[in-house]
Image (tube, rainbow, N blue to C red):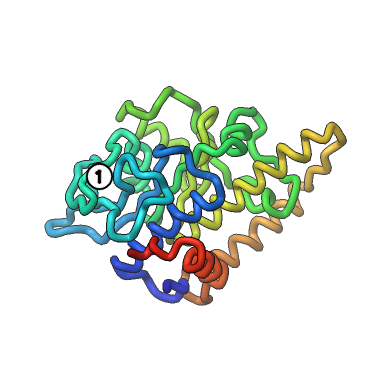
């Protein structure tokens, strides 16, 4: 079990990525067989870039450590234990981000109802609570250009993302980066909660209390400090360990 104190090996990375797929499914954040979570593998012989991706056609609750597919930066299959290939077009966004952001081990993309709803309004995520304050001033935006099949769009996605770890894909969904699979998952869960809470709060028809910029920024820095401590190897990651224990009970075959 990766505790954030050392870099995970390949087998551990496969387990973590499979765990992320299962957790997204358990939280009801999947979208049939669509969207992806990818992870960067160590470079292959000759410096070949390699990534893990889900087999095309499997639901997220069917993904396991052993059936993950290895692809290169174009989405071309290098190793395919399951034999179904991948949705290469769906890897368009992920490949662009991985190639530009070498600090991102994991790239996680969702189409949740709450995430799509908030991505579809001009204001985006508002600092209404502790969850959403984490993202204050740290969310990038990319305008919708249609289904992400156009390779030319990759440069615009990367430019809009910059050095941030969270992006709202306008009228589309969310994109999270993580220095580990665990970090990407925690960001995804907290962003989803933020979107749900925002929709609930604004839906009451009462006056929302928006946090001041100073308080929101202070809270965001507190979150960042805690995440940095884990990702820099200075602290264990009890939250990720708890998520894995949940899977050990609910879906132990994710490790197969």
| Residue at screen point 79% across, 43% down | 210
Please indicate whether residue 151 sits to the left or right of residue 20 in the image. Answer: left
Q: Is residue 248 visible?
A: yes
The C terminus lies in quadrant: bottom left
Question: In x, y percent, where is residue 132?
Answer: 67, 48
Element at label 1: loop
Residue density around tag 1, few if under 14, some if 14–19, many if 20 or more, within 10 Å? some
| Residue at screen point 47% across, 48% down | 163
Q: Is residue 230 visible?
A: no
| Residue at screen point 71% across, 44% down | 197
Please indicate whether residue 179 sits to the left or right of residue 28 in the image. Answer: left
In the displayed structure, 40 sits above or below 139; it is below
Question: In x, y percent, where is residue 231?
Answer: 48, 67
The residue beneath circle 1 is 73
Looking at the picture, tell me which residue is in the foreground, 14 or 6. Answer: 14
The N terminus lies in quadrant: bottom left
In the picture, residue 104 is in which quadrant? bottom left
Q: Residue furthest top?
A: 146
Question: In x, y percent, where is residue 102?
Answer: 35, 54
In the displayed structure, 192 sits above or below 123; it is below
Q: Residue furthest left?
A: 46
């Amino acid at each position: 079990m990766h505790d954030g104190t050392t870099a995970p090996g390949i087998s551990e990375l496969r387990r973590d990525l499979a765990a992320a797929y299962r957790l997204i499914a358990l939280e009801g954040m999947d979208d049939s067989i669509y969207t992806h979570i990818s992870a960067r593998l160590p470079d292959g012989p000759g410096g070949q870039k390699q990534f893990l991706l889900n087999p095309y056609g499997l639901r997220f609750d069917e993904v396991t450590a052993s059936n993950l597919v290895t692809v290169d930066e174009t989405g071309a299959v290098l190793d395919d234990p399951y034999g179904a290939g991948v949705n290469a077009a769906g890897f368009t966004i992920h490949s662009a981000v991985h190639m530009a952001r070498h600090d991102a081990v994991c790239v996680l993309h969702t189409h949740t109802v709450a995430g799509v709803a908030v991505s579809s309004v001009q204001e985006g995520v508002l600092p209404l609570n502790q969850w959403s304050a984490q993202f204050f001033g740290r969310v990038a935006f990319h305008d919708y250009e249609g289904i992400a099949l156009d390779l030319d769009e990759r440069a615009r996605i990367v430019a809009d993302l910059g050095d941030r770890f969270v992006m709202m894909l306008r009228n589309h969904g969310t994109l999270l980066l993580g220095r580990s699979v665990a970090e990407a998952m925690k960001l995804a869960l907290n962003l989803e909660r933020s979107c749900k809470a925002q929709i609930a709060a604004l839906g009451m028809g009462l006056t929302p209390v928006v946090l001041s910029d100073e308080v929101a920024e202070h809270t965001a820095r507190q979150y960042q400090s805690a995440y940095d401590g884990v990702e820099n190897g200075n602290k264990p990651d009890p939250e990720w360990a708890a998520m894995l224990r949940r899977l050990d009970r609910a879906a132990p075959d994710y490790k197969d």
